[in-house]
Image (tube, rainbow, N blue to C red):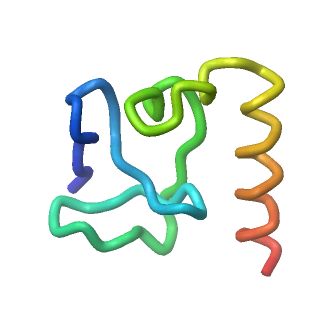
Amino acid sequence: MIRSDRLGLGIDVAEDCAVLGADGSPSRSLFYIGPWLKANYWEATAVPDLRVFARRLAGTLLA
C-alpha cells in the first residue's frame, strides 16, 4: 500500500507530502513528514526544515 523510496530508506511521497502507493498514485488521506523522507529530502530530519514541510502540508489540508 506504500511505496518505498528509491534508496529503501523510507517512504515515497508527492510534493504535497501525500504518501505514494505501490502504483505511484498519491493518497488522498495519508500524508507524512519526518525522517522517513531522508532519501529524497535529507533535510527532513532537522526541526527547522520539518517546519517547512508542516507548513506545506497545512496548506494542502486547508485548501
Q: Position of residue 42 (x, y in %)?
A: 52, 26
Judge left or right: residue 46 versus residue 14. right
Image point (58%, 30%), residue name = 34
- Judging depth in this view, the residue of 34 and 38 nearest the camera is 38
**Quadrant of the image containing the N terminus:** bottom left
Taking the view exactly as shown, the residue that stands out farthest to the bottom is 63
Name which residue lies at 79% across and 59% down.
58
* Relative vertical location of residue 39 with respect to residue 14 in this rendering, above or below: above
Left/right of residue 31 with respect to residue 20 in the rendered view: right
For residue 52, what is the image quadrant?
Answer: top right
Tell me the quarter of the image containing the C terminus.
Answer: bottom right
Residue 4 placement (x, y as % from top left): 23, 41
Write down the quadrant of residue 19 in the picture. Answer: bottom left
> Measured from the top left, where is residue 29 in percent x and y?
51, 67
Tell how many labels. 0
Residue 21 position (above or below residue 60)? above
Q: Is residue 5 above or below residue 19?
A: above
